[in-house]
Amino acid sequence: MNSKPILIVCGEPNSIFSELLAKSFRKYQSKKPIILIGSYHLICLQLKKMKLKAKLNRIELENDSLKNVNLDKINIIDINYNFTKVFEPISSKSNKYINECFDKAFNIIKKNKISGFINGPISKKFFLKNRYLGITEFIAKKFKIKENYAMLIFNKNLSVCPITTHLPISKVSKKISKKDIVIKSLIINKFYEINFSLKPKIAITGLNPHCENFFNKSEEKKTIEPAIKTLKKKKIKVFGPYPADTVFLKQNIKKFNVIVGMYHDQVLTPIKTLYGFNAINITLGLPFLRISPDHGPNNEMIGKNKSDPQSLIDALKFLNRK
């Protein structure tokens, strides 16, 4: 195999991912081999039901080493699992299958060089069960990375990063730290330098409305401003803190490559309003590039053959760019 493959875990079996796979490979030809980990039987049944076609090539492993990989087909490592229905409501019944897919992928990653890792959508409600805040944290824990990682929602025009991820609003202020802001900003800066030969301009938001000091010492004064000062001393192009209600105005976002916010919806709501699902979720700080298309299982659209594969295509294009 001349080129390092892109490894894909199907994720939640009761999702739109089989549909997106077929549509993606019809519209975009990867320059690098694709290796899919999931149920061959289920994928075939789902594609048949939606009248979609995809060239699948079942491959075998020898001690988790990759053999007989085909560039022109979707290579699949079969996770044999007894599914009783082609599509059904999402539930915890899928957990064992999803775990097997991830375990197989992680074993392969540890023994082979890959171009990147993509995972299909996962139900946080059923798979994570409050054990992890998100798949970002799940994967980081599997590779024993405690804090040196960041979730970047990447778009070539503007990217965003939340300091806290899937956390209740009531807990956000207690979880924001100077250390986290500095670590994640440094990781983002390194990512742009390595991948784009660019020192990014990073805007950092405040937490409170208008960044105002409503009490003795606000998060802006206590945590965010000191973090920005530290980053500036490290020669990072960082600015702020900015009020979150104005930093995403058109005349403002032109000034920055990345906006770092204090919590999930503070930055993900505006980025999706601006670009829809034309973005990819990249986990920075892992020993490999991990990308997730920026959408969930979308239970309401399963089996309808109406879903847009653009986010998955963008993920593949990103991993094919070099």
Image (spheres, grey):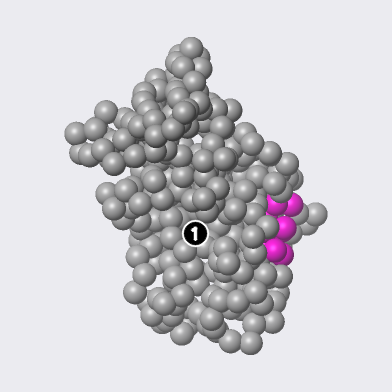
Task: Name the amino acid, label 1.
Answer: Asp
The residue lying at 43 percent from left, 80 percent from top is 303
Q: Is residue 104 magenta?
A: yes
Q: In the image, is residue 91 above or below residue 164?
A: below
Of 311 and 259, which appears nearest the observer? 259
Q: Is residue 75 magenta?
A: no
Q: Identify the element where label 1 is drawn.
A: loop
Give percent across and percent down for residue 18: 49, 70
Identify the magenta region: 99-108
The chief SS type of the magenta part is helix
The residue lying at 46 percent from left, 28 percent from top is 216
Horizontal side of residue 56 vs 243, given as left or right: right
Give percent across and percent down for residue 10: 57, 64
Q: Quadrant of residue 321?
A: top left
* Residue at the outermost right position: 63
Q: In the image, is residue 127 above or below residue 224?
A: below
Give percent across and percent down for residue 247: 29, 36
Q: Quadrant of residue 260?
A: top left
The residue lying at 80 percent from left, 54 percent from top is 63
The residue lying at 20 percent from left, 38 percent from top is 250
Label 1, on which residue? Answer: 72
